Image: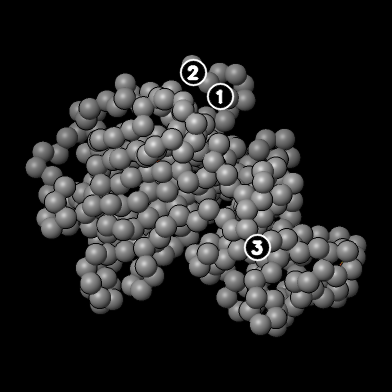
Amino acid sequence: MNRRRLPLSLRRHAVPWEGQRPTWREARPGVIAGALKRAQARPSGNWFVVGASRALRGDGKLARTVAGQEVVVWRGPGGRLVGGPGVCPHLGAPLRDSPVRCGTLVCHWHGLALDGGPYAGWAPLPVHDDGVLVWVRLDEVGGEDPLDAPVVPRRPGRPGALDAVYTAVGVCEPEDVVANRLDPWHGAWFHPYSFVDLTVIDAPGDRTGAAGDGPDALTVDVSFRVAGRLVVPVRAVFTAPEPRTVVMHITEGEGAGSIVETHATPLGADAAGRPRTAVIEAVVAASHRPGFTAARRAAPLLRPLMRAAAGRLWRDDLAYAERRWLLRSTGRFPG
Ligand code: FES
Ligand SMILES: [Fe+2]
């Protein structure tokens, strides 16, 4: 694909949905299962994505139940990132409902004040802000050797980049979300409203080698649908840098350098005992056009990419992940 070609293309032949080439023969279950297995073998250092950094501006706060453990994260005195259990050490009030006042989390039941340091039996947890997302480290949940910092994907430089974070919750496990993202072959079939002309040009095959033995990426040529026959053709490379993250890098075409990071965070079981997983997706969109104004001007072209992470697309992908979990949990998954 030529980088200098016009970012927008007009599809010459509008192929009807049913007329496109079936991809099921290439989307071999063994290839997807192999990629998933290798992702799961990579270290996460027990870090879990909690939410968007943006939520912590001012007296903001992030609260989430991760694998059944309530956690709360906020900016402590001086803006320092702090976090810990979301259960008040006094009588157990849910700290997710307690306000932050000048860096202090004040329990709304009896006023116990936490500044992020150990206090009255409350012990802080390691937390990390990578500039777009906030992570918490839960060693008992993860069960791996801890790492000092999470495995954060390489992102485009911030000046002029547009970022957005979307969250959705489904009844499934993180691996179902990751498996969905490691199946790029479903793109133009399952999401014809967003993607057309999808070709997987390189896949790792169904080797089951150990993690890290050589490149492990899925490369896809695809067009984002803008309107009618108007599309933005790009090349995208999918990788799984850690067990609960899949990254799509746009490597060629409009928005080259942009990434979509999909993070799956286990929340714990619902009332019926079924697992719930949050999909927290960060889009950091960049334009190779120099300068902020140009990047702003390119925003309409980047918007389909931004939108690709949101709304209808994730409704459908969550349905895929939930279906996969349902079949797995009842012994009906094909193969
Ligand atoms: S429960 Fe929080 S101060 Fe009493
Ligand atoms: Fe999808």
- In the orientation shown, which residue stands out farthest toward the top? 335
Question: Left or right: 179 with respect to 173?
Answer: left
Q: Nearer the viewer, residue 225 or 202?
A: 202
Please give the label number shown on residue 327: 1
Residue 251 image offset from top left, x and y in percent: 28, 52
Q: Nearer the viewer, mark 1 or mark 3?
A: 3
The 10 Å Cα crowd at callout 2, few under 14, some 14 to 19, many 20 or more, is few
In the image, what residue occupies the spot 74% across and 66% down? 97
Residue wearing tag 3 = 127
- Disc 1 secondary structure class: helix
Question: Left or right: 214 with respect to 13?
Answer: right
The 10 Å Cα crowd at callout 1, few under 14, some 14 to 19, many 20 or more, is few
- Residue at mark 1: C-beta within 8 A of ligand 2: no
- In the orientation shown, which residue stands out farthest toward the front? 213
Mark found first going from the N terminus, 1 or 3: 3
Q: Nearer the viewer, residue 142 or 54?
A: 142
Q: Amino acid at mark 1?
A: Leu
Question: Left or right: 180 with respect to 84?
Answer: left
Query: Compared to 131, does 249 lie above or below?
Result: above
- Disc 3 secondary structure class: strand
Residue wearing tag 2 = 334
Q: Amino acid at mark 3?
A: Val
In the image, what residue occupies the spot 28% across and 43% down? 195
Residue 286 image offset from top left, x and y in percent: 31, 64
The 10 Å Cα crowd at callout 3, few under 14, some 14 to 19, many 20 or more, is many
Count of residue discs: 3
Tags 2 and 1 in contact by the CB under 8 Å rule?
yes
Say if residue 267 shows up in the picture: no
